[in-house]
């Protein structure tokens, strides 16, 4: 096959990131230090309108520590989507609390507000929806529901750096929010996570929990973890933070081109007032989705991704029997096409040609 492969995702690491890592290596100060502190401040200023942030070693750690710091533990329930990466439910279970799986709506693959409302009990500590694929969940409705029922709202914003709702940035709605910095996210630190919170007590507990329960060395206030981010990772993240706005604009332009030209598939929808940052450009294929993905690769040399083929409640790790029909539909039909900022116009044209041809053929 003569055409170059188009990957579904492509991390961008340039000379600036390499130079930043070399500078940390040359300094001899590799663990959590000045670079982490600067990264926290800059992330807050660029993406969170100044809300306090705490850097950790992964997105999953961010969810886990955020929940613990918010007081979630044994005997509590937290309502989460089943249609997401397993880390969302895992982080609840790791606190000793019980994840309660709710269904999604199929326009934006976010928690269905009415179904969430039906699941709230006297054990419910909070709701943790996901801004999936880079599109914000219904923060207004879920926030109002949480307030009405006297429970917390937590944000899994792993995929939504820079997204917003009615001018308010994702990550500024809940008791805490977590952003992932994994290599395939819209920006990366190599590996890592960032947790935001407006609550000074929650912030301090997260800082203690990530560092063996210490603020001052050898004065452990809590039983904590080693979930620190290194200065090496923070140095990469600081450089990426200067580029993420431009990359997001390119993702949005790529998505606009795809939406304007694709035929025969359900393209992503964007809610009124929402800014979608297109971590993934996710279509739905009502026929043989897996055959469609295979044909894209074998006939056109185009990669794609299926996120997420097995709903969390049916994973062996949870093995639940909830009836979540929209979740099952999404798991069966979704397919994410390349939308990353490295795509050329030739790449985009080839993606459109391939998808339209396969959709017309009923592949």
Image (cartoon, rainbow, N blue to C red):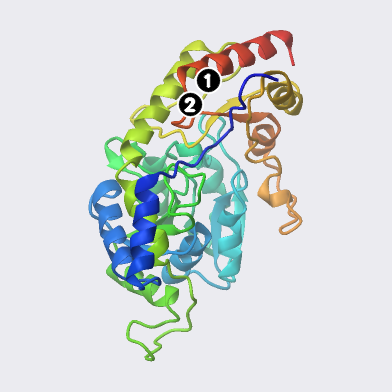
Give whichever of 232, 277 is nearer the camera. Answer: 232
Q: Is residue 269 left or right of residue 98?
A: left
Is residue 278 depicted above or below 140 in this figure? above
Element marked by disc 2: loop
Q: CA distance from mark 2 to mark 1?
A: 6 Å
Residue extending furthest toward the bottom: 218
Q: Quadrant of residue 20?
A: bottom left
Query: Which residue is painted at 46% across and 13% down in the image?
Result: 260
Quadrant housing the C terminus: top right
Q: Is residue 5 left or right of residue 162?
A: right
Give whichever of 62, 120 is nearer the camera. Answer: 62
Q: Position of residue 44 (x, y in %)?
A: 27, 54
Query: Which residue is painted at 42% across and 77% down in the image?
Result: 211
Where is mark 1, residue-wise?
A: 347
Q: Is residue 309 left or right of residue 30?
A: right
Q: Position of residue 315 (x, y in %)?
A: 73, 52
Check whether the beta carbons of the residues at disc 2 and disc 1 lie within 8 A of each other. Answer: yes
Where is mark 2, residue-wise?
A: 343
Give whichever of 279, 1 is nearer the camera. Answer: 1
Q: Position of residue 14 (x, y in %)?
A: 40, 44
């Amino acid at each position: 096959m003569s055409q170059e492969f188009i990957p579904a995702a492509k991390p961008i690491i340039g000379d600036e990131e390499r130079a930043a890592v070399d500078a940390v290596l040359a300094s001899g100060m590799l663990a959590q230090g000045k670079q982490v502190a600067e990264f926290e401040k800059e992330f807050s200023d660029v993406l969170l309108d100044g809300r306090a942030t705490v850097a950790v070693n992964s997105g999953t750690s961010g969810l886990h520590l955020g929940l613990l710091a918010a007081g979630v533990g044994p005997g509590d329930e937290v309502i989460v989507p089943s249609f997401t990466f397993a880390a969302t439910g895992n982080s609840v279970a790791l606190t000793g609390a019980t994840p309660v799986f709710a269904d999604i709506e199929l326009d934006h693959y976010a928690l269905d507000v009415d179904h969430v409302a039906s699941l709230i009990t006297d054990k419910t500590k909070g709701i943790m929806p996901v801004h999936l694929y880079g599109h914000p969940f219904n923060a207004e409705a879920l926030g109002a529901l949480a307030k009405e029922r006297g429970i917390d709202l937590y944000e899994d914003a792993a995929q939504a750096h820079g997204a917003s709702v009615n001018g308010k940035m994702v990550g500024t709605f809940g008791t805490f929010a977590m952003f992932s910095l994994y290599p395939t996210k819209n920006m990366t630190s190599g590996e890592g996570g960032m947790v935001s919170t407006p609550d000074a007590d929650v912030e301090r507990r997260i800082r203690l929990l990530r560092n063996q329960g210490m603020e001052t060395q050898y004065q452990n206030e809590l039983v904590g973890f080693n979930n620190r981010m290194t200065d090496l990772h923070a140095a990469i993240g600081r450089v990426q933070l200067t580029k993420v706005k431009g990359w997001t604009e390119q993702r949005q332009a790529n998505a606009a081109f795809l939406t304007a030209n694709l035929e025969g598939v359900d393209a992503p929808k964007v809610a009124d007032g929402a800014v979608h940052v297109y971590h993934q450009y996710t279509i739905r294929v009502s026929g043989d989705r897996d055959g469609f993905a295979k044909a894209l690769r074998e006939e056109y040399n185009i990669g794609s991704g299926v996120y997420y083929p097995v709903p969390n409640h049916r994973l062996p790790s949870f093995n639940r029997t909830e009836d979540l029909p929209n979740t099952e539909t999404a798991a069966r039909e979704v397919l994410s096409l390349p939308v990353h900022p490295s795509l050329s116009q030739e790449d985009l044209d080839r993606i459109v040609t391939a998808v339209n041809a396969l959709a017309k053929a009923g592949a």
